[in-house]
Amino acid sequence: MTRAQIDTLLQKIESTEQVGGGNDRIKAIVNRINRDLFYAIEDLDIQPEEIWKAVNFLTQAGVNGEYGLIAAGMGIEHFLDLRMDEEEERAGISGGTPRTIEGPLYVAGAPKSVGFARLDDGTEVEEGKVFFMQGQVVDGNNNPIPGAIVEVWHANLKGNYSYFDQTQSDFNLRRTIETDENGNYQFRSILPSGYACPPGGSTDVLLTSIGRHGNRPSHVHFFVSAPGFRKLTTQINFEGDPYLWDDFAFATRPGLVPDQVDITDAEKIKEKGLTKPYS
Ligand code: DHB
Ligand code: FE
């Protein structure tokens, strides 16, 4: 069909919308996406069996609860970040730690402490490598913000997150840290492994069929908030991870790979009450 014929058909479909009925914003979005889809069906000569296969795929993706993963994998979540960056730039807001995607695995209500927290429950301390991370929450003028809330969450050595992985203890690798009087926070944990989309799941099937993988590099998530300030959603990554710049969710950004130092000095190891090198 020609574009004109398709447009006539779309007008007929849209003309069934009750004037003053429904929600104008939703109408605008749905009609636009439907139009783009009709054009794609025409331009790519998408066959009926391909459409019904897609409908079944989407149904199963919903059953599997994988739409969040698909949104990340298609780069939509990263695109939203870039658009928020752009909006801030237009408003004259710049600097600070870059934002990056939240992902679908945050859980509210993690145990809270001031200044320091240990995130891991100890079950992987033998197998894993201990790391400490410290930082300071500052405002746009570099003034420390005491009492800021730093929420941290990450995966275990299997790349799984507590709560979603019911074999882990409650809130394992999830904590809420309030910055101290100097705006500082520190935590101790186990270096996480990267995440892989569930094998054979909808996201995995989709990515495989377009010649991509569903892996994320090892990372730690953060929410940073304080009264009177915008909330930061971000992550850090670790140097040396093979997927560092090949994240299926496109979340790695310059400025989010902090300096990492291996501590092998016996005295320093002992000082921390540890028996092997840490990071
Ligand atoms: C996604 C994000 C994550 O941080 C993660 O660990 C797994 C998946 C995501 O955006 O799909
Ligand atoms: Fe994650």
Image (tube, grey):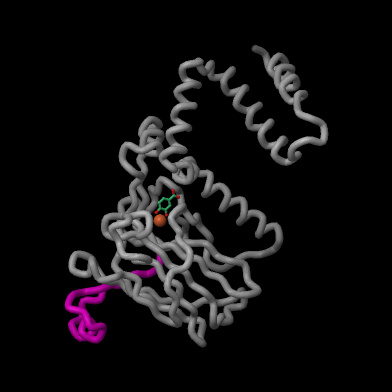
Q: Where is residue 177 in the image (x, y as percent from the top left)?
A: 45, 76
Above or below: residue 51 compared with residue 95:
above
* Quadrant location of the N terminus in the rendered image: top right
Q: Is residue 183 above or below residue 103?
A: below
In the picture, residue 11 is in which quadrant?
A: top right
* Residue 118 image position (x, y, % from top left): 34, 75
Q: Where is residue 106 in the image (x, y as percent from the top left)?
A: 45, 59
Q: What stretch is highlighted in magenta?
A: 257-279
Residue drawn 49% across and 80% down?
179
Name the residue: 59% across, 76% down: 139
Q: Is residue 103 left or right of residue 23?
A: left
As drawn, is 260 to the left or to the right of 60? left
- As for residue 229 lying within the magenta part, the answer is no
Q: Where is residue 128 in the image (x, y as percent from the top left)?
A: 23, 65
Which image quarter holds the C terminus? bottom left
Q: Residue at x 58, y 74 (%)?
A: 226
Task: Pick out the residue farthest to the right.
Answer: 19
The picture quadrant where one finds residue 235 is bottom left
Q: In this view, does 172 lie to the left or right of 50?
A: left
| 262 inside magenta stretch | yes
Q: Residue at x 51, y 87 (%)?
A: 181
Count of marks overlaid on the render: 0
Task: Kindly give the residue lying farthest to the top in the view shown.
Answer: 1
Is residue 120 positioned above or below 61 on the image? Answer: below
Q: Main secondary structure of the magenta part?
A: loop
45 lies above or below 75:
above
